[in-house]
Image (cartoon, rainbow, N blue to C red):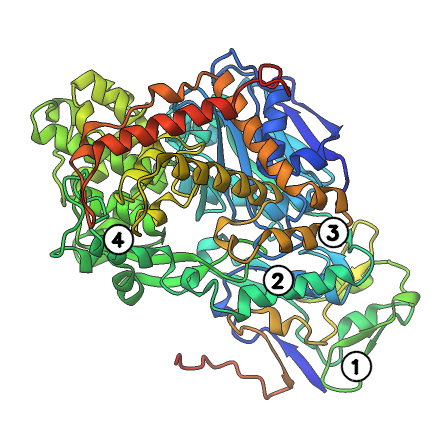
Amino acid sequence: MKTFFAARMDRCIGCQSCSLACARLVHKRLSWYTAGIRIGSSGGISTGFEARVCLACDPPPCAAACPTGSLTPRKSDGGVKQDRKLCIRCGKCVAACPVNAIVQDELNNPYMCIHCGRCVSFCPHNCLELAEKGQANFVQEVAE
Amino acid sequence: MIRNDFRILLVDLTIRKAHIVDLPGRETYIGGSGLAAMLFEKYGDMAAPWNDPKQPLIFAIGPLTGYFPLMSKTVCGFLSPYHGQYAESHAGGRSALALRFADMDALVIVGRADRPCVLSVGSRHMEIKDAPFLWGKDVFTTGKMLRHMLPGSGTRSILRIGPAGENGCAYACINVDTYRHFGRLGAGAVMGGKNLKAIAVVGDASFPLPEGKQYAKCFHEIYDQLTETSMMSKYHDLGTAGNVAALDALKSLPWRNLQATSDPERIDGISGEKFAKDMLLRNTACSGCPVGCIHIGYLREKFMADNRYLYKQVAYDYEPIFALGSMLGFGDGFKVLGLMDAVEREGLDCMSSGVALAWATEAMEKGLITEAETLTPLSFGEAEGYKVAIGHLGAATNEFYRLLAQGTLVAAKHYNGEDFACVLGQEMAGYATGETFFVSETLSFRHSHLDSSAYSADQKQQDKDAGKIVAGFVKDEASRCVLTSVVGCLFARGVYTEERLKAALSSLGLQNVADNLTKAGEAIQKLRWRLRLRTGCDPMSAKIPKRYNEVVTWKGPIDTAYMEELRQAYATRLLELGREEDEAGQ
């Protein structure tokens, strides 16, 4: 299955267009936080930016921690599917994520990347990629 | 969240309490510039001085903030320590989206804390922390310490001041998220006067999207215009620095305190092309803006023998290159970056600082001041003296620097150097383009090159028709009032036409605001001028120093008679715009 990668974050300018697009298009929210991908500085804006996003663990510990079956592993290549109707907002997935990629809003609803790739086209510097696992281009392309 | 009423967080530092205030007026005042003016009228005291604790410091966003790309600016409204009048300054960074997601249309700060403090606000918290240990710290150290002290990493904006703001410099800025600033007319000193070293705005709320398909359609149309056409490419390519060589070629770039308008020997060392090729490290962006116009330069400095180096990342733009580069006689971009870094550290406005030091240098050449005043040699093109002087300017070390920190003209009056003070309302912007710009900057609301398209008009042949030019200034200002009220970046003014702004407002359910947009722009313009006049502005008395009569541009010498005619015509028109409504019979 295709998987989302924040493959070239050293190009990131911190515009947060990806987070805003995820919140808007996937979660139907206006937010830079309740999104599957969140952008923060790596310790002050002079240090560049990093993406807090699902790394597609296989098997995913968040799905293992989910007590109600709201999160289940995708068919292959790691990551999870989310069925919001089954979520009891317990936050076990947040605690289980080893890379802090899941957040809860003020009502405790969890938000995580579902590897749909809808944010990719909003990145002006082509930092993001949806690709088969192992196929993502992490190498800097040479400028024209 | 979009509401028809304005939701204001009013913080009183004296009693350390805050209130949520809901105020009507969206249709008339929109947000941003309009809202800030409305709030200043409500909370400001027109007769009290700028440093009276009760005077408000206002940060306002608009209805489109966060909902559309490049709607990424915050308007700061305050009583300026520079001239004692109501003023505005604009900045981006994360500030605008942080306010949006902290669920407030404006943050208004009144009162004065009894000791240095830091204010942290969000959608679910308000806290004032004592921070006397930060007082006296430079902007860089303060930033590093705040990151550990405050909540909300990744979703917050940090506004902070340096020594200049603490010491009441009339052009101290507020640093926003390291690389942006509320600059120019001294908002940093207003913060300092309140004993407020920093403000963190944590954007920790999330809102439902507007219902229906209109919003998504409108968003994508605008996003495509901004990213898939060439309309914004100049801003992320060379950035505003791309104008440096162009203005020099037009004999319109001020050099050495405006003693020249072109320098073919030095221009190649400070052009936007040179910066991009040898100094540009990377770009960054304001939140919600895919353009990424912020250009970060790389500065490497040897600080000790045996190859001990340090490196800095310094944001550059056209105006800092002009003010700390050509204006101070530099043909070496690396040296200019070093001065930008020094100015940043003190929390000074870079344009005002550069122009002030250019005046001081010429005053020294003319023997009006000596090293007894400046405490260091000042000479065009010599960086080390300027670095020392910038430290003194931030610290207000002696009487000379205290005067210079109140404005170039204050020092110039004291030392008899007014003729060559490059002041157009405030220390000039980098456009020695001609009569239209000189008059526009002298009198316009922010004394900014972005108040009108005057500098652009000067670059073309135009009729010397003062009435027509003034009508253009006024119309231009009203339309910019709309954009700075919704609040959009002025770089996006080509994309955000009135028609697109109306569609965007309508898609958020603000049809009433869309329908009243043109009238609101005019009403906001008039309110700003009323506030300006009430706080002591006298447009007729604003003079253009003699140095501007001596400028030679691509069009030849300045037509001083025409410039004076234009100045009087514009000043007269501003008095009409700012007339009290009952007097105007409205």
Answer yes or no: are tags 2 and 4 on the same subunit: yes
Q: CA distance from mark 1 to mark 2?
A: 35 Å
Whole-percent x, y for residue B554 in the image: 20, 50
Q: Is residue B377 left or right of residue B395?
A: left
The answer to whether residue B13 of the structure is visible from this angle is no
Q: Are marks 1 and 2 in contact (CB under 8 Å)?
A: no
Whole-percent x, y for residue B83 in the image: 39, 21
Q: Is residue B543 left or right of residue B37?
A: left
Identify which residue, B20 or B132, lies in the foreground: B20
Q: Which label lies toward us, 1 or 2?
A: 2
Report the amino acid beneath label 3.
Ser
Q: Which label lies toward us, 1 or 4?
A: 4
Disc number placed over residue B222 in the picture, else none: 2
Disc number placed over residue B109 in the picture, else none: none
Residue annotated with mark 4: B247
Q: Earlier in the sequence, mark 3 or mark 4?
A: 4
Is label 3 in a helix, a strand or a loop?
Answer: helix
Is label 1 in a helix, a strand or a loop?
Answer: loop
Quadrant of the drawing holding the N terminus of chain B? top right
- B321 up-or-down from A34: above or below: above
Residue annotated with mark 3: B506
Whole-percent x, y for residue B198 in the image: 52, 34
Q: Residues within 10 Å of mark 4 (few under 14, many from 20)?
A: many
- Which chain is mark 4 on? B
Q: Which quarter of the picture shows residue A103?
A: bottom right
Q: CA distance from mark 1 to mark 4?
A: 58 Å
Q: Residues within 10 Å of mark 2 (few under 14, many from 20)?
A: some
- Which chain is mark 2 on? B
Q: Earlier in the sequence, mark 3 or mark 2?
A: 2
